[in-house]
Each structure stands twice: as structure tokens, then as C-alpha cells.
Amino acid sequence: MSDLSVFIVTYNSAPLLRSCLDSLRAQTLGDFETIVVDNASRDDTTTIIQAEYPEIRLIASPTNLGFGNANNLALTEAQGRYIVLLNPDAVLPADTLARALQHMEENADAGMGGGLLQGTNGEWQPSARQFPSLLNDGLTLSGLANRYPNSRFFGRFDRSWADPLQATPVDWVPGAFAILRRSLLDTINLFDPRFFLYYEEVDLCRRIHQAGFKVYYWPDLVITHIGGASSETVDELAFSSSGKQLTLWRMRSQILYYRKWHGLAYSWLVKGLEQGWHYLRAWRNANRAPDKAAESRHIVQLWNQAWQETQGGLISPPQPW
């Protein structure tokens, strides 16, 4: 059995993949395995791995399994005592895996841990967050979270007020880089298969807390993360104006998440909050900014579509989305 099993899910990730895999080759930790699940890429992802990285175990899926289910597939073949989730557009310093392993060994109550995510120019990315809620969604929609990032109230969702160099237990950490305790996953499972993309790691962190474990943020684990690279290769659907999320997919998962953890009425309120905001935005921009008004009307329609397709959060539409 290895100390760690590193999971990488790829989808048309060829332009960035070498930097990620080379950073794994440079790790000071010797005892780990890497499993790549490719979600039916149309580029040279699988060719690069087979030709240049023979030490990697490649699982080439004939269909797009999504992020969660691809990681679930990797788990069935993993031999590590700990599982590391890593995005193909992330690069690790050489001591990252060794440090992550040490943190988990020293904190018996840690079910999952994440690090400090930064962009290619060293800019901070949200790395330790509060669970989504009606209030947090409202603060984000209104722009108040971005306007007052140093406020404990307005900056609550991304914890933008907090010292990024302070290690602490948190609600959840992004799946761009995370380390998990395998023995816990054997009890609670990895990802809920209903989440094709988005909210899967939030749901996982809720189940980790529910099982009596903590989710930690460890800023000495510094990860350079480009972000949204795989999503940018999907061009058939509308993107949100911020965050590079595929809007419809995000809405489906959002409804599934809120229905699972907060019930029907709360899910409907979340839907109504964003729709109400965009009704007002469309009305305000009807004459002075027709493009923005059209964008808002489209988002309102997408919410109705997502609600119908998930039956108000009861089912996941047929996958791949």
C-alpha cells in the first residue's frame, strides 16, 4: 500500500498537463501513485501521458464521467492510505505532498485538508470557504462580497477577511487540491454520483463534518492554479460572467445540493433569489444596456430549465450533462 494516491481528472487538458505532471515527478515524497482518469478528451491528453509518463496509471473513459464520478472510478483502483485530488491545471512545489501527508498524520481529526491556491502571478484565490447559504448567495449576487472583502460579514463566503497565512479548520476547501483520509472515504464514500460538475466537493465536506471529522486549511501547502481550464473547452453553453462556470450545470448542481441539505422550500428560495435579482437587472438595463438585460433574462430562463430538469433537486439529469 502506498502512502498517497494522487487523482487527476482530465478533459482536453493537454496544454497544461505537462506542468502538472512534471511537478509530481519532482516531489520529495517517494511513495505515492498517480492515477489519471481522462473524460473522453478530444485533444492529445492520453497520447502525452502514454508516451511521456509511463509511470502513471491511465484510465481512459469512453464517455465524460464528470469530475466526481471520474474520481470515484479512480478510488476503486487506488492503493494509498490517503487520497489527493489534483486539477490538471495545478502545479505543486516539490515538498507539497510530503507536507500534506505530515499534516494528516499529525491531525487525527482531519478528514480532508486543502492549501493556499494562487494564480500564475501569485494572486490569491479563494481557498477556504463557508458553506453556501441563502445569505452567502445574496452577498455574492449583490456584489457586496467583492466590494467589502475585508468585512467579516460581507466577506464571509470566501473568508476574504481572514489572514491567508493562518491555518484553521473551515467549512470546505476546493477540489483543485485536497488530501483525504482513505479510511473515512471507505465509510462515507467519495463523491455523490448525482453531481456531474460543481458542488460535489461542498457536499463531500458536509458529509465529512457530519461524520465527526474536520476540514483543514493549511497555507504552507501553496498550489499554483490556473482555474477553469477544462471548462473553457466546452463552448456549447452559456458561461457565467464571473468564475468561468457553465451556468446551467452550476444551477443544476446548486439545486441538487440545496434540496439535499436544506429541503424543497429553501431550494426554491435560492432559485427565486437569483431570478429576482436578474429580473431587476433586466428591468434596469432594458434601455441603457440591452445586452446585459438579455443576459439576465437568459439566466432567469436557465433557472426554470434547471429546476424542471432536476425536478426541484430530486434527480440528476441523465449524464453526461
Image (spheres, rainbow, N blue to C red):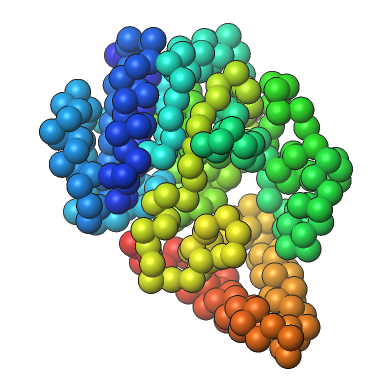
Residue 230 location (% of width, % of height): 39, 51
Q: Is residue 135 among the parts visible in the rendering?
A: no
Instruction: Count the labels in the image.
Output: 0
Residue visible at 57% across and 70% down? Answer: 312
Residue 25 location (% of width, % of height): 31, 19
The image quarter in which residue 87 lies: top left
Q: Is residue 215 among the parts visible in the rendering?
A: yes
Up-down relation of residue 97 to residue 303 (above or below): above
In the foreground, 252 or 285: 285
Residue visible at 48% across and 42% down? Answer: 226
Q: Is residue 19 left or right of residue 145?
A: left
Up-down relation of residue 52 to residue 87 (above or below): above
Residue visible at 44% across and 35% down? Answer: 90
Up-down relation of residue 74 to residue 244 (above or below): above
Farthest-out residue, front: 121
Residue 192 location (% of width, % of height): 46, 48
Residue visible at 64% across and 40% down? Answer: 126
Up-down relation of residue 307 to residue 119 (above or below): below
In the foreground, 269 or 130: 130
Q: Is residue 193 left or right of residue 218?
A: left
Question: What quarter of the picture does the C terminus occupy?
Answer: bottom left
Question: What quarter of the picture does the N terminus occupy?
Answer: top left
Q: Is residue 166 left or right of residue 188?
A: right
In the foreground, 17 or 68: 17
The image quarter in which residue 144 lies: bottom right
Q: Is residue 99 left or right of residue 51?
A: right
The image quarter in which residue 125 lies: top right
Residue 35 location (% of width, % of height): 28, 31
Farthest-out residue, bottom: 287
